Image (spheres, grey):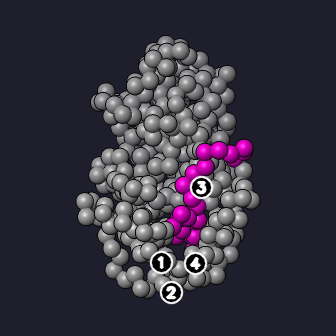
Amino acid sequence: MSKNDIDYLIIGQGISGSFLSYYLYKAEKNIIVIDEAKPFTATKIASGVINPVTGRRVVQTWLIDDIMPFAWQAYTELGKEINANLISQCNVLSFHGNEQMQRAFEDRSIDENKYLKKPANIDALKNYFNFYFGVGETNPCYLADMQTLLSGWKNFLLNKNLLIEEKFDATKLTIQNTNSITYKNITAQKIIFCDGIEGTRNSFFQLLPFAKNKGEALIAEIPDLPRNNIFKQNLTIVPWKENLFWIGSQYEWNYSDANPSATFKLKAMMQLQQWLKLPFKIVDHWAAERPANIERRPFVGLHPQQPAVGILNGMGTKGCSLAPYFAWELTQHLINQTPINPLANIARFSTILSRN
């Protein structure tokens, strides 16, 4: 096989593209990744939190009993490849905003006490926070170091001559047949799009029910705040690097652009001033679009009309937990033809995709 004759061409080196390329590389497949260097992407500004419960109703996340142990193993193994510790346990302390939220957590903790607990020393938290309706703990939660993962795996790929840093040019792509594509001077058996928000404009997959949203985060210095937990009350405060913390909310559906907004920054700072008893200093402000979807289930698999074209996308706000799991599932499907979870397989959109 020549240098330009490969098995898989992967578009994008976010969380999905990183894990897919990692698993295919470990399976001794010939790969090339194409990725445009951008300062802000959904993965680059992600908090890295892997939380087994979600929403105001505090329900267990989809597939979490499978995804939690898989995520720990996946990040640990990739970390060994790049000589980095990529995952740690960092439980979430949820500060209830009202009596209804407090009762919801307590009721769920009775039914689903596998993950929901009462913190050991709530009184100590009064040194750092203002709160009036109690605190609940989600245990275990994990924290993945997304920046080290992306930069470390990028350097690994570059050292192996497996990464081309450029913007993917769709006009240079030709589908030869069901088992072959060409892109510029590269011939591959398949092309897999892990292109994040660009997937909403991808001619093969733009008809999928993407639901774009915008995430924003502040980076703050809070020198006196303990770093052994994630703190949550409307905002989420996540240990970052050195004495820095990542501070963000879930997402915004209605927005005019993908830039950091003064409105978010002001609102977040006002919330922090009411919640935190400690001084803080904002040192950075980030924003990026995320490729969520209406069903809240990812898009995984091969195009039903173009089997040489595949996708791994649509992870939404759960990308840190879902991407490793479905990257592995897609890898096994490509190599061994094992089935993809039907709730994630894009075969469920065969009728829509046939309109392309």
Image coordinates for residue 145, horizontal then vertical, percent: 50, 60
Gap between marks 3 and 1 measured at Cα: 31 Å
Position above or below: 37 against 189: below
Residue 241 is left or right of residue 139, and the answer is: right
Kindly identify which numbered label has been placed on residue 132.
Answer: 1
* Label 3–label 1 contact, CB within 8 A: no
Q: Which residues are magenta?
A: 233-258
Mark toward the start of the polypeptide (4 vs 2): 2
The residue identified by callout 2 is: 127
Find out whether residue 248 is within the magenta segment. yes
> Upstream in the sequence, badge 3 or badge 4?
3
Q: CA distance from mark 4 to mark 2?
A: 9 Å
Closer to the N terminus: mark 1 or mark 2?
2
Q: CA distance from mark 3 to mark 4?
A: 23 Å
Q: Nearer the viewer, mark 2 or mark 3?
A: 2
For residue 264, which quarter of the picture? bottom right
